[in-house]
Structure formats: C-alpha cells, structure tokens
Image (cartoon, rainbow, N blue to C red):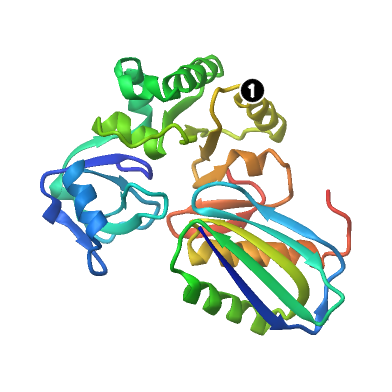
Amino acid sequence: METLTFKFNATKSVPKHAYVGVVASGDLEILLEPSKEEKAYVVVRTASDGFGETWKNLLDRFFAVHDIAANIEINDFGATPGMVSMRLLQALEVCSSEKTER
Amino acid sequence: MELNPHDLIRFRNPDSIIFDSPKPGWAIESLMRAPFVVVRRAPMLGSAVPVGIRGGSRNQRLAATIELDHIIQRVAPEELALSKSWRTNKHLQEIGISYALEFVDSLLTQERMNWGPTGSVGFELASGIFTATENSDLDITIRVTKFLTVDTAKELMAKLLQAPVKVDVQLETIKGCIILAEYARGESLIMLRTTDGPRLVKNPWL
C-alpha cells in the first residue's frame, strides 16, 4: 500500500463533484471535489507499490490538457494506465456537466 | 481450443512462459509452485496467449504469454462451479470460503445464471495449491449473454450481500466485461473492459 500526492496549477473551475469507478481489482475509484484555489491536489492510494513514476507521467499528461481546480482522491486496485485515463476522463465529464445527474 | 479471460491454463514447463521484462524471483517461484497461469483480457498475438502470473501478495501480478502448443489443460471458471470441488477442499472449508461458494452456487443456479469462481479461490480450486486466505473476497464471473436490466442487477447485488464473505462480481457480456456493482448504480455510462482495452459505453450488450 502506497500513498502518492501530486499538485498541479489549475485555471479551469468545475461546477460540481464527481464520483466514478468501483472497488474491484483492475479498477479504481475517483472522488473529485471542485476547489476555489487555482490548484489541483491529487492523492493516490494504491495497492500496487512502485508505480510512482507511472502515476506522475499519467497525471502530468492529464492536467497539461485539463487543468481543472479540484481536490481529487484516487483509490487504485491495480488498474492499468489505460483504465486510469478512462476513469479520469469520466470524472471530468461528470464534474463538468451542468445538468444534474440522472 | 476456446480461451476466455479468467480461464486457468496448465502448462508443461515453466520455461514455456514468455516474459516481456526480466523475470522477478517471486514469479519464478510461483510458476514452480503451481503450473497454472490465468488468461488475461488482451489480444492474442498469433498463437501467443496473453496470461497473468499471480504471486503470493496482492501486488504480485505479472503479464506474460504462452504459446498455444504449450498448454496442456484449460479450466474455465464455470467448470469449477459445475464440479463443486470446494465440497472436498479442506482448506477452503477451514477459511470459510466453501460456505460462500455454496451460497453463491445455490443463488445463481436458482437464477439460472452460468457462473464461476475466479481470483484466488478459482486458482486454488483448479491447482489445489493454497492461494485463498481468511481475508480473501470471493471473485466471481457470471456469463450474461442477454441484456440484464439495472433493476435485476440491483436485486442480484442485494441477494449477494447476504453471502458470508464479500462477493465481487464481473458480468461477462458478449462485448466484454462490466462490474456488477457499477452497473447496478444505473448511471448513463458504464466501463466495458474489452480485449482492446476499457471503454465507456451506454449499453454493454450492444
């Protein structure tokens, strides 16, 4: 079990929170709360140790394109980088949509 | 030979397992202990089957491949459920998993669903090697070829909550696999895991 933290500069605010993903092996959960600060804070708790560099590269790429101001918690259960990227885009979609869910 | 993700395959010789990267010690030990690997959800490369090696701890998982010729047996999760071999597995009885398997089997048989144990429990049932522990969840796969409503998924979740251990369910549709717990939330998009990677879809059966 490893906890990794990351900080990014952010310019875009998002209207609402998001919760996506599941507790399942090969998957992850993402909890996203909009932030008033012009920063994104990401905390990753992962069951797979030793992938700090992979997480850094993946999040660098994501926030280079989507610099959203948010506090993000990720609980990872051994997801592949492809799965992580899809879930981040899903969280972005949910937190950016103005209409209420369902 | 038809191979699906989660199938356990027995190999002749640990040397027939091909690694992309240098072999960690735990992986070699694991191959020596039990001659089984698990089919991964990834594309076949010619006659090379994508497989995963499981080590003793949760983060010990490694991707590898094996040539079809080197496979001597394939055990599908459904076969493990049909043979009910947990009834004669002392270790699984001791750690309480047998009761959970019995519960799930009777529930899903009643629901007329094809299912099978995967993860550590499936591995132990196929190989006979102690793999599951007292802390293990029960991972299962259910083959659902026809559309299942979200309401039915919710009811199934509620029934499975009565099981003596936590049951994690993957539904295998004709297009790939989804997680029951996610589908039962009834959101507009669901993650479908396919051999070509994950994608978000509206209907995982279309």
Percent of width and height locating residue A55: 53, 72
Which is more toward the observer, A13 or B65?
A13
Say which residue appears at 74% left-offset and 47% top-offset: B187
Considering the numbered disc 1 on the image, is that residue within a helix, a strand or a loop?
helix
Say which residue appears at 55% left-offset and 46% top-offset: A24
**Kind of residue at badge 1:** Lys
Q: Looking at the image, can residue A35 be seen? A: yes
Question: Where does the N terminus of chain B fall, quadrant-wise?
Answer: top left
Q: Which residue is mark 1?
A: B159
| B87 in relation to B31, above or below | above
Say which residue appears at 55% left-offset and 77% top-offset: A56
Q: Looking at the image, can residue B1 be seen? A: no
- Quadrant in which residue A74 is drawn: bottom right
Percent of width and height locating residue A21: 64, 53
Percent of width and height locating residue B51: 30, 52
Classify mark 1: residues with Cα within 10 Å, few (<14), some (14-19) or many (20+).
few
Which is more toward the observer, A6 or B37?
A6
Question: Horizontal placement of B119 versus B160: left or right?
Answer: left
Which is more toward the observer, A61 or B147?
A61
| B124 in relation to B59, above or below | above
Say which residue appears at 50% left-offset and 15% top-offset: B106
Percent of width and height locating residue A27: 54, 53
Question: Horizontal placement of A41 versus B18: left or right?
Answer: right
Question: Horizontal placement of B75 versus B193: left or right?
Answer: left
